[in-house]
Image (cartoon, helix red, strand yellow):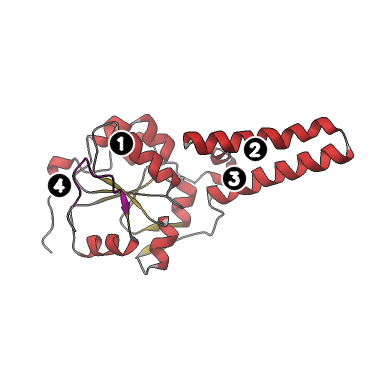
Amino acid sequence: MTSPSPSTAITALAPETLRSWIAEHQDLAVIDVRSAAEFESMHIRGSYNVPLPLLSEHTDELAARLGSRVVLVCQSGARAEQARQRLAGSGIDTAYVLTGGVPGFATAGGDVVKGKDRWDLERQVRLAAGSLVVLGLAGGKFVSPKIRTLAGVIGAGLTFSAATNTCAMGQAISAMPWNRAAKEPTRESAILQLPVADARQTPAA
């Protein structure tokens, strides 16, 4: 499959296509932008873990190390798309977002490495948001009508999150102790572990 030109809007990549790229030894960097804990739970074999906050902080430095074929993955595609937009601002116009994320790749028969089972970050966000809405409605009925404001605040926050393609709640939850891995990625361990683009050689098929 030929990579589209920078002007082409297609950025989604099917799991089956990624499997073929990996099998054909294409010049390829698979960047997993989930948290280290999610990465430990399950990740695509050979992928690099560069959590979205770290990528956002060192976008230019990461972009300088990437070659012409970059695939960004997360749990569902939302965080990977944020990463794609940031890299596009640093000159990486040919990055792809894996459709269905890591779970979709595993379902398609892709080679993944599994560790300790954990709730992914997006599931935790849904639980937290839903719980706060229920708490606000119940509190408004049994304690004080003013507590219903909590449900409205959560609704407004989710609307803003969708409009800006960001998630403040997700960032807050990702910092919780249960979402911390034994060894968190750093600039040195995540960004500098990537081979410099000019030094990469495309293996023979």
Few, some or many residues within 10 Å of mark 2 (<14, 14–19, 20+): some
Secondary structure, mark 2, is helix
In three-dimensional space, the C-alpha distance between marks 2 and 3, rounded to whole angstroms, equals 13 Å
Residue 182 in percent (x, y) is at 49, 46
Q: As drawn, is 64 to the left or to the right of 101?
A: left
Query: Could you tell me if the residues under marks 1 and 2 are in contact, i.e. CB atoms within 8 Å?
Result: no
Residue 189 visible in the shown view: no
- Whichever of callouts 3 and 1 sits on the residue coming sooner in the sequence is 1
Residue 31 visible in the shown view: yes
> What range of the chain is rendered magenta?
3-12
Residue 155 image label:
2
Which residue: 49% across, 49% down?
37
Res 143 quadrant in image: top right
Query: Could you tell me if the residues under marks 2 and 3 are in contact, i.e. CB atoms within 8 Å?
Result: no
Which residue: 10% across, 61% down?
204
Few, some or many residues within 10 Å of mark 4 (<14, 14–19, 20+): some
What amino acid is at disc 2?
A: Gly
Q: As drawn, is 130 to the left or to the right of 124?
A: right
Q: Which residue is mark 4?
A: 200
Secondary structure, mark 3, is helix
Q: Which residue is mark 3?
A: 125
Q: Which residue is mark 1?
A: 87
Split into 4 quadrants, where in the image is the C terminus? bottom left
